[in-house]
Every structure is written in C-alpha cells, then in structure tokens.
C-alpha cells in the first residue's frame, strides 16, 4: 500500500514539475508575443502620424504653389539649371517664386512616383529672407542664391525626420544639418523637401513601411533605384532641379541610372561623413560612404561641387575631411584625357542596351577630343566583389538583424530580413553547390559570409590589394579615367533587387571599395533592338537567369554610363560628365 502511495506521489510530483515548466514557458511566450504586439501597435501609431504629417505638408505646399501666376510659373518651369541660376542672380525671378514653382513640380512628381517624405515648410521663410537681403544694393548674392534643393531623408536636416526607413527611428530628429547641407545653405540653396528611401538604405530598390514604395518615373512597375530612390524619382520626373543623396555602394548612381538623371559620388574624404548614422554597417572605412549630388544635368552638379569646395568649411567642422579646394586646373574646359573603357567586366555581363550606350559614349567623347582606349579589369571585379561582401556582413549580419527586430517591413523589403536570418550551415553548403554548378556569382555571394576574424582581415587586405592593382594598371597604360556601365540592367521590377544576389550591383559598388569618385550620366534609352538582342543574352548563373526572365519589356527606360577616376581626381570626372552630357544634347538637336 505504501509502495502504491509512493508511486502515485512520485508520478504527481513529476507531472507537477512538467506542468510547471510548460506553464512557465507558455507564460514567457505569451509575454513576448504581448510585448511584440505592443511594439507593433506603437510603431503602427507612429507610422500613421508620420504619414499624416507628410500629407499635411504636401497639402500646405499645394496651396503655396497656387499663389504664383501662370506666366511666371511657365517661365520658371522651362529654365534649366544654368538659366535659373542666371535669372536668380540678375533678379529676373525671385527665390520665393522659384520655390513656389518647385513646390508644384515636386507634388506632381510625388503623385506619379510616391517620392516625397515631406515638404520643408521653413523653406518659404528662407526664400523670403534671401529676397529681402537682395533688396540691399550692397548685398552680394551667394553663387547658388535661391536654388531649391531636395534632400534624401537619410541625410541630416535639422528638425526633420532621419529614419533610414525604420519606423523605430521616427521620433529621432537631428539637431543640426549635415555639414554639406550647412555649406549649401550658406551658398544660397534652399532645402525644400525630403525624399524617400528603402528600409536601412541597404538595397537598390526603394520601399519602407512608413512612406511606401517609390516608382520609376518612366514605368510604375519598375523601381526608381536605391537607396536615394526618392531623389532619383523626383529629379527624373522634373520635380527638383538638383538634390543631395548619399552613396555606399551606388546609392546615388543607381537611382540616377534607373530614373534618368545624373549623379555623382565624390572621393569619400573630401566630404564629411561623421554625422551619417550607419553604425549597423561593419568595416565602414573600407566601403566608403559619402553624400553626393544628383541633378537633371551635370552642370548643376559642377556648381554644387564648386560651392562645397570653395573653402575649407567642411574640413573646419570635420578635421577628418581633406581640405582640398575645387581644382579648376583639372576641370578646365577643353582639357582632354585618356579614357579607358569596357562594356563588360568579366563577371556578370550587362544587358545589351547597357553595353550599347557605353560604345556610343566612346564615339561621342572621341568627337570631344578625348583619347579612348580599351581597358580590362582582369580579376578585379570578382576579387573586390566577394571580399567587399565579406566586409558588409563581417558581423554575420547581427547589426542589421538588430535594426530590423520588430520592424514592420513592406512587401518588397521582407526578403532582406529573411536573408539576414539564414545560418552559415545553410549558406556555406549552398555556396559550394553553386560553385560546383559553375555559378561563380551566386557562389561568391553565399561564401562571402565570414566564419572568423582572420577571414575578415584577409578581405580587408584583398580589397586594398585590388586598389593597388587597378591604380598600377591605369598608370602603366597612362589612363586618366575609366568609362564603363553604370548598371547591368535598366530599372528592374520592384521585387528583383532583394531576390537575387547583390553581386548584381557590383558595377557601382566596386568604385566605393576603390574609393574612386564616380559619376553617372543618362545618355539614352532602351530600344526595340536592345529588346531583340536580350533573347541571346548569355546565362551563366542564377543572377543572369533571373535578370533575363524579369528584365523584359524595357523599351523607353533610361540608360546611362559611368565615369570614374582615382581618388581626388573628382574634377576630371566632372569634366568628362559635362562633355558627354553636352555631346548627347548636341546629338539630339
């Protein structure tokens, strides 16, 4: 009897322990789910407020835009940057009237592409203050007096959102402008709106849970690019004459290419980057991030760079920035350069149209008097690519995972979260499988994930080795600049950038890793012949297969080329950008 009682007691005790453990685990999971639900609810409320603030500011700007007469509006709308600048300098138009016109143009662009995150209301007071100063006959107008400028939302603008597309950062408002914005304001520019970005700014599509998805101006089913995608769409739609974005792996140049405008990434240390909050990106000293201008034509970019480098304002505020003035000797009109060119880098081949415009640019620059010679990257693209990816995920993606924790994701950005959670025991075998299949692009992307500190250290050394190699190659061949594709395809569907290996963006990323200044100029558009030739595009791996399948029906989409030079030769890049743009313009006449 005692044995039975003891057995029952033991059974009950064991059952009680198990139930207690199960109950504790259940309670913990319920608390976690409750907390996550609370966070999601809080973020949803913040998103609603942010969207309401944006819509209210746009409604305000619409009212302001209607206060200018049709004659003045039409006159200002037809001016290019050079004409607008001259009209503002001579007083033929006022800063206030120009601003009201661009309020209206920006709203039209937004209705077409969803590119705005808000209007900067104090811009109207800034314009009025400039006009008031101009009434004093002794007042010397700054070189960019009254020019309106749009600002990427991830670039600091005092008192305005700087979320990086993350709902959890909606409440953060910078207390000071980016030093580049400060300097441009001193030169008379008027920041009048902020533009959309993708979540974390770590991709080349443009979508987030706060402001939605930005569309390509020429085709709403295609992306405007990223991460400065709002800038690209706004400028490409004529809603801004110039803007300021930022570029880590092509974030200025890709949107310029996809949306049909121009963009420039300067040598990283000629700008200040100390205010840019990108602490979730490891190895930032290797993958150089910098702010950079975008515009409808490169003449505007040149004048912005002249203003930014007219003195040592930036380096005085940030001693880590190199104090180099704008080098007129390198930009001098009529100066001719020896330019190496390639249409394919030997890694992932650009589509037919993207190669064709490079060949056309070669002929146009020859007419301008430049010396064009073939150039090969040899192994540099692949070696840089796989080691650059290692540095991007040097922490295994932990920082990005942390940033995305509990973050609501838009449809097109969801794959970014899932990719960061894939463990090494899956990515490594997959990488070796693709390598055995001969798909080097996909294999390099998957095998890039580091397993130890030595792997990361080796990647740093190899990127620097590639820098040394390409500079020596250019010296040996007496090449000043390189002309090459800006992207390997025109604006793709919104979903494509986050569903194929990011080796597809190496056309621009390479030059961040090399720290070469790089500019993009739109020179043409995709033709029916390009579409026909796409049928014979060679498929070497997963990326090419997906690109060929998804990037069809491209007729009319913008196409561009990229011009690069070694560090601190920025003005040479700008010179060739202007020469090429003018040659394209003259060809169209």
Image: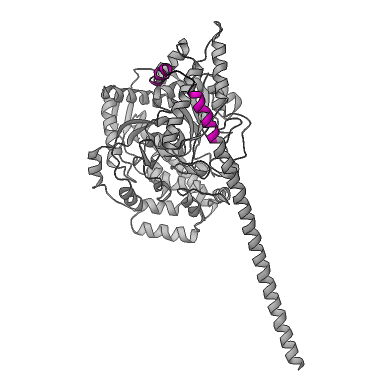
The location of residue 463, given as percent across then percent down, is 45, 42
Residue at 60% from the left image edge and 26% from the top image edge: 317
- Tell whether 150 sits left or right of 577: right
Question: Viewer-proximal residue, 300 or 249?
Answer: 300
Look at the magenta stretch and give its main secondary structure. helix
| Residue at the limit of the structure toward the bottom, as seen here | 1
Question: The N terminus lies in which quarter of the figure?
Answer: bottom right
Residue at 50% from the left image edge and 52% from the top image edge: 417
Q: Is residue 30 above or below residue 245?
A: below
Q: How many marks?
A: 0
Question: The C terminus lies in which quarter of the figure?
Answer: top left
The location of residue 290, given as percent across then percent down, is 50, 33
Question: Viewer-proximal residue, 214 or 515?
Answer: 214
- Tell whether 402 sits left or right of 449: right
Q: Is residue 115 above or below residue 315?
A: below
Kindly indicate the quadrant of the structure image that contains residue 5.
bottom right
Q: Is residue 206 visible?
A: yes
Residue 64 in magenta stretch:
yes
Residue at 34% from the left image edge and 40% from the top image edge: 490
Kindly indicate the quadrant of the structure image that contains residue 437.
bottom left
Range of the magenta residues? 54-80
Question: Viewer-proximal residue, 40 or 429?
Answer: 40
The location of residue 301, given as percent across then percent down, is 43, 24
- Tell whether 551 sits left or right of 61: left
Residue 411 in magenta stretch:
no
The location of residue 379, given as percent across then percent down, is 36, 44
């Amino acid at each position: 009897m005692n044995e039975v009682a003891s057995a029952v007691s033991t059974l009950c005790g064991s059952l009680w322990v198990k139930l207690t453990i199960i109950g504790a685990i259940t309670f913990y999971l319920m608390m976690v789910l409750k907390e996550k639900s609370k966070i999601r609810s809080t973020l949803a409320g913040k998103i609603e407020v942010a969207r309401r603030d944006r819509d209210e500011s746009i409604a305000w700007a619409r009212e302001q835009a209607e206060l200018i007469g049709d004659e003045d509006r039409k006159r200002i709308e037809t001016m290019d940057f050079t004409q607008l600048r001259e009209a503002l300098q001579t007083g033929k138009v006022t800063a206030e009237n120009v601003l009201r016109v661009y309020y209206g143009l920006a709203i039209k662009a937004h209705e077409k592409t969803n590119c705005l995150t808000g209007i900067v209301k104090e811009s109207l007071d800034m314009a009025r203050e400039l006009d008031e100063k101009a009434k004093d006959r002794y007042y010397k107008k700054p070189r960019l007096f009254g020019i309106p400028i749009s600002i990427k939302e991830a670039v600091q603008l005092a008192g305005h959102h700087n979320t990086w597309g993350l709902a959890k950062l909606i409440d953060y408002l910078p207390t000071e402008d980016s030093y580049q914005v400060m300097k441009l304001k001193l030169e008379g520019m008027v920041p009048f709106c902020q533009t959309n970005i993708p979540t974390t700014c770590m991709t080349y599509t443009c979508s987030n849970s706060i402001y939605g998805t930005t569309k390509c101006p020429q085709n709403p089913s295609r992306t405007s690019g990223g991460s400065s995608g709002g800038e690209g769409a706004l400028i490409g739609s004529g809603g801004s004459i110039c803007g300021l974005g930022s570029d880590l792996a092509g974030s200025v140049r890709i949107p310029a290419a996809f949306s049909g405008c121009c963009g420039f990434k300067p040598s990283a240390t000629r700008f200040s980057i100390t205010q840019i909050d990108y602490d979730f990106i490891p190895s930032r000293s290797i993958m150089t991030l910098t702010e950079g201008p975008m515009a409808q034509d490169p003449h505007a970019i040149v004048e912005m760079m002249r203003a930014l480098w007219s003195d040592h304002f930036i380096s005085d505020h940030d001693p880590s920035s190199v104090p180099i003035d704008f080098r007129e000797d390198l930009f001098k009109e009529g100066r001719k350069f020896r330019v190496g060119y390639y249409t394919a880098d030997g890694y992932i081949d650009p589509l037919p149209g993207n190669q064709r415009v490079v060949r056309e640019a070669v002929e146009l620059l020859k007419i301008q008097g430049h010396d064009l010679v073939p150039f090969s990257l040899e192994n540099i693209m692949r070696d840089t690519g796989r080691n650059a990816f290692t540095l991007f995920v040097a922490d295994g993606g932990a920082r990005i995972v942390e940033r995305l924790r509990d973050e609501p994701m838009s449809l097109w950005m969801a794959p970014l979260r899932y990719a960061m959670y894939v463990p090494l025991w899956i990515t490594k075998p997959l990488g070796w499988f693709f390598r055995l299949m001969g798909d080097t692009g996909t294999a390099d992307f998957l095998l890039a994930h580091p397993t130890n500190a030595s792997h990361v250290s080796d990647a740093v050394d190899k990127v620097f080795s590639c820098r040394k190699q390409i500079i020596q190659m250019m010296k040996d061949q007496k090449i000043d600049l390189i002309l090459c594709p800006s992207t390997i395809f025109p604006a793709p569907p919104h979903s494509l950038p986050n569903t194929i290996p990011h080796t597809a963006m190496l056309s621009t990323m390479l030059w961040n890793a090399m720290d070469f200044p790089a500019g993009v100029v739109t020179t043409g558009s995709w033709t029916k012949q390009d579409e026909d030739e796409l049928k014979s595009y060679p498929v070497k791996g997963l990326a090419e297969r997906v690109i060929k399948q998804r990037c069809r029906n491209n007729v009319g989409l913008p196409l561009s080329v990229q011009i690069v030079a070694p560090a601190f030769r920025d003005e040479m890049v700008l010179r060739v950008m202007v020469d090429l743009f003018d040659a394209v313009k003259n060809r169209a006449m």
